[in-house]
Amino acid sequence: MSGLFMYLGDLFHIKYPSSNQKAYAVLAVSAPLGVFLATQMFLPFFFHDILIFPPFETFVINLRSELNFVEGSEAALGLAISLAAISVPAAIADYYYGREEKGVLDGITMFLRDMTENRKTGLGPEKCIRILSRKDYGRLSKYLKRVNSQMNWGFPMTRIMADFRRGVKNWLAQINMYLLIDTIVVGGGNEESFETLAEFAETSAALERERKAMLNPLLIIPLIGALLLVVTATMFLNFFSSMSGMLQPVIPIVTLRQILITPLVLHDFLLGLVTGKIVSGRVSSGFKTGLFLVVLAIAGIWLSPLMSSFIEFAS
């Protein structure tokens, strides 16, 4: 179901012809470690024959004891550690490259406006670029200096654009640079063309910010869903724990915890991935949300005995 919703999110979401895939390269590196940890820290609690390195299982058992988690939550802790090993590098990479793209897009929007104002003074387009390349435009500055250097060396505009596209994966930044070069080469670089280009860049950036602002409230939905899952599962387990004389010989409470709590961690993680895809259009942005929801689920497991004591006290 999570995969279906991610597919629908991709189907109806605004997509650009190119995007940054570097976060997924980091995921490809961290995924084998996470899979290995899952086979040694999570699956052995269900299929003990798969265990190859017993110290990993012992570590999870000792961790459960040290943190005062309820017995039967070992598999959930092992799964959470495995998912964290996959998610943390991918979440860091997505955050870094996301900031990089946003910085370049903001820089090129300011650069085009300054380019327009300088062009109105009568300076040629090449002279404007040479002057503005000394100004600080954040993460765009290094690319702008490279463009200026290539223009001074007489590189063809097609090569300059190809080099810029290799370094910058944001589609809006690419199209703005393409229109800038096309305006200089084909349009003659007149003031009206630069004014139109600057307005296009500002409008595109404003629409992108508005789209993100409209979708950001959707982040509340998985938080509510995760809280409901944790509270419901905890209350259900507390109910069965209180019926010690009737059902525990048939269904041991430790086995019941293991069966119900472990999928809760995985479901919260998948819920975070779906949210990231729907809100930002990138699955990679869902790793930080998924990791936060996994931590929330683990916190709910840890608080389970306290909730049980509170219910008994209230009754």
Image (cartoon, helix red, strand yellow):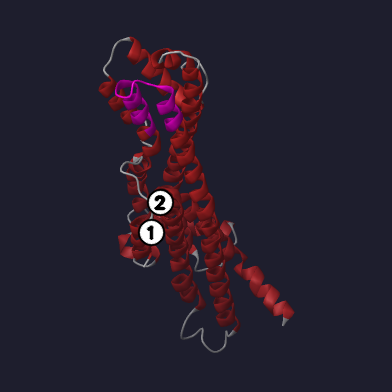
Question: Residue 68 placed where, x, y %?
Answer: 60, 61
Q: Nearer the viewer, residue 307 or 1?
A: 1
Up-down relation of residue 70 to residue 97 (above or below): below
Q: Is residue 134 magenta?
A: no
Residue sitting at x 51%, y 62%? 222
Q: Which mark is residue 281?
A: 2
Q: Nearer the viewer, residue 71 or 102?
A: 102
Question: Residue 174 placed where, x, y %?
Answer: 36, 33
Which residue type does callout 1 highlight?
Answer: Gly
The quadrant of the rendering that contains the N terminus is bottom left
> Quick check: can you spot residue 76?
yes
Count of number-bearing discs = 2
Question: Residue 17 placed where, x, y %?
Answer: 30, 43
The quadrant of the rendering that contains the C terminus is bottom right
Q: Is residue 190 magenta?
A: yes
Q: Count neighbours of disc 2 (C-alpha within 10 A) and say few if under 14, some if 14 to 19, many if 20 or more.
A: many
Q: Are marks 2 and 1 in contact (CB under 8 Å)?
A: yes
